[in-house]
Amino acid sequence: MERTFAIIKPDAVERKITGKILEKIEAAGFTIVGMKRILLSKEQAMGFYYVHKERPFYDELCSYMARSPVVVLAIEKANAIADWRELMGATNPADAEEGTLRKEFGISLGENSVHGSDSPESAAYEIPYFFNALELV
Ligand code: UDP
Ligand code: MG
């Protein structure tokens, strides 16, 4: 079993498609082991995305992530990290494959509906950024 970290991003929560995305997560065989709806401060978003701090889109990305509530998730299955990236689809919804969440729900390169850890190292940073051990069941 492997755990990864996911976010249902502001564009999706605002459009009330949280339930549709959760349904697809469970249908794909993931167990939701942690979940909460939170409103990030811009500073919290900046800490979460610190790996992108030198990128030109960093400020806009962090403002967007703090614009309205998100749903943060820890999800578990065999090969969870790669399988969740596959279900999400390419970063740019325009490049995402049919059947992926970003293809179905993404609005733009920035507002692409979902986040997923890209490696075991990033999952190990991102899960405890939002959840303590008692919140993962
Ligand atoms: N992003 C953006 N412009 C870009 C690249 C990325 O606004 O040119 C945003 C987008 O929301 C993306 C996030 O920054 O999901 C993190 O970028 P990353 O390259 O890590 O993509 P991801 O891992 O989310 O597919
Ligand atoms: Mg990434």
Image: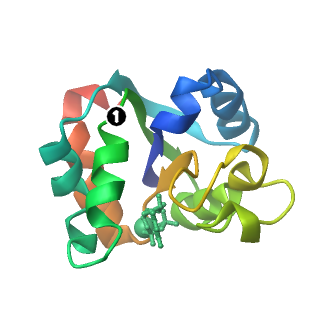
Is label 1 in a helix, a strand or a loop? loop
The answer to which quarter of the image holds residue 109 is bottom right
Residue lying farthest to the bottom in this orientation:
54
Q: What's the coloring here? A: rainbow
Residue lying farthest to the right in this orientation:
98
**Vertical relation: 26 (above or below) 38:** below
Q: Amino acid at mark 1?
A: Arg
Give percent across and percent down for residue 126.
28, 54
Give percent across and percent down for residue 37.
37, 23
Q: Which residue is mark 1?
A: 67
Asked whether 104 or 136 is in front, the reply is: 104
Give percent across and percent down for residue 19.
65, 22
**Which residue is painted at 62% across and 20% down in the image?**
16
Q: Relative to residue 90, is residue 2 drawn left or right?
A: left
Give percent across and percent down for residue 34.
39, 31
Which image quadrant: the C terminus?
top left
**Vertical relation: 84 (above or below) 137:** below
Asked whether 67 or 81 is in front, the reply is: 67
**Vertical relation: 78 (above or below) 72:** below
Q: Relative to residue 64, is residue 97 drawn left or right?
A: right
- Image region (quadrant) for ligand 2: bottom left
**Which residue is painted at 35% across and 56% down in the image?**
61
**Which residue is painted at 64% across and 56% down in the image?**
88
**Which residue is painted at 22% across and 79% down in the image?**
54
Camera sees residue 1: no
The answer to which quarter of the image holds residue 30 is top right
Mark 1 neighbour density, 10 Å: few (under 14) some (14–19) many (20 or more) = some
Camera sees residue 109: yes
